[in-house]
Amino acid sequence: MPLLNQPVSLSHYLLVGAILFACGIVCMATKRNAIGVLMGVELVLNGAAVNFVAFSAPFLRGDAELALGLDGHLMTLFVIVLAAAEAAVALAIALCYYNTHATIDVDQGDELRG
Amino acid sequence: MINWHTCFFLLFATITCAFAVAVVVSANVVRMAVCLIASLAAVSGLYFLAAADFVAAMQLMIYVGGTLVLLVFGVMLTARGPFVSMKITPANWLMAGLAGGALLILLLCAATSVDAWKTAAVAASAPAAEGGHTVAPIGMALLGIRVDALEQANPALRGGIAGYLLPFEIVSVHLLVVLVGAAHLARARRRRRPAEAVPDASRSA
């Protein structure tokens, strides 16, 4: 099987990141549950983090001197930490919304519509 | 000869993408949470295969162990009756699918457009020997010392090699503020419901 014999390259990682990103965008657009929208945001952030890690690995690409190295790893760590912070705040907002509106449907929160 | 690096990459990539699609197509929010856990755990496997061992461990500990537990708690606190499964109309699915498909095609074209990205530098199983010891350099970089980039010969480029002490401090203060703010936002408070006004009125009367 020729697919299993060739080494993994940067493009393969970018394909996985692209699929994660597109799934996250569609999830954010189609979910009516506020928690579901949050899950879409997590998918988008993971797609970006996969790209950071892939660009930082020197053995995945032909021009190894252009690899990000440790900078990509550190950026991924900051993305993970900020995603945790974002999830905490957004979940608190969702709970607050649920307590005041008695629903979790994001379409119902339209008091600020002009 | 089978390249086991490629084998495990394909395994983890398939799990990641399949469960990400399952998150999108599932209407039940509890199933979405379970699929998201599986997808993000498989992403940490991809990080291990890219020789980012510390990032992969943090992905497992912070994301799968922390953020998703938080999300599951959110699901448990709000998934009640009609909110477990909320459907949208086929027209909305069509619009979102068109936009997402266009974005996906654009990203796939961009990912396969550069020739240097399609050829791996080392054949066979060399990645295991090349990297995978990033814990100590990352710890030193967070303290402001880049032990991985000491031998930069060009003095013009040496200024761009920065430590990460300041971002580390900013993120730590940011986390503190976020946790205080989240605790303040989600504090227990009486829900205003019209049903509660009736017994209060009868008790006062």
Image: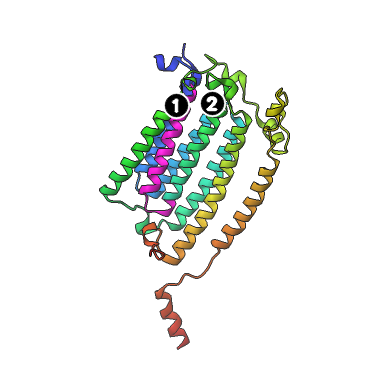
Q: Residue A105 vs residue A88: left or right?
A: left
Tag 1 residue? B11
Q: In the rendering, which numbered label is found on residue B49?
A: 2
In this rendering, the label closer to the viewer, 1 or 2: 2
Asked if marks 1 and 2 fall on the same chain, the answer is: yes
Q: Which residue is found at the position 65% from the left and 26% from the top? A: B133
Q: Furthest residue to the bottom? A: B205
Crowd class of label 1 (few under 14; some 14 to 19; many from 20; radius 10 Å): some
- Residue B112, by quadrant, is top left
Segment tinted magenta in the rendering: A9-36
Determine the CA span between mark 1 and mark 2: 11 Å
Look at the magenta stretch and give its main secondary structure.
helix
Element type at marker 2?
helix
Question: Can residue A105 be seen in this snapshot?
Answer: no
- Percent of width and height locating residue B31: 39, 45
Q: Amino acid at mark 2?
A: Leu
Chain at numbered mark 2: B
Answer few, some or many: residues within 10 Å of disc 2's Cα (few below 14, many 20 plus, some between 14 and 19).
many
Q: Position of residue B171 (x, y in %)?
A: 64, 47
Residue B145 place in picture, x, y as percent = 73, 34
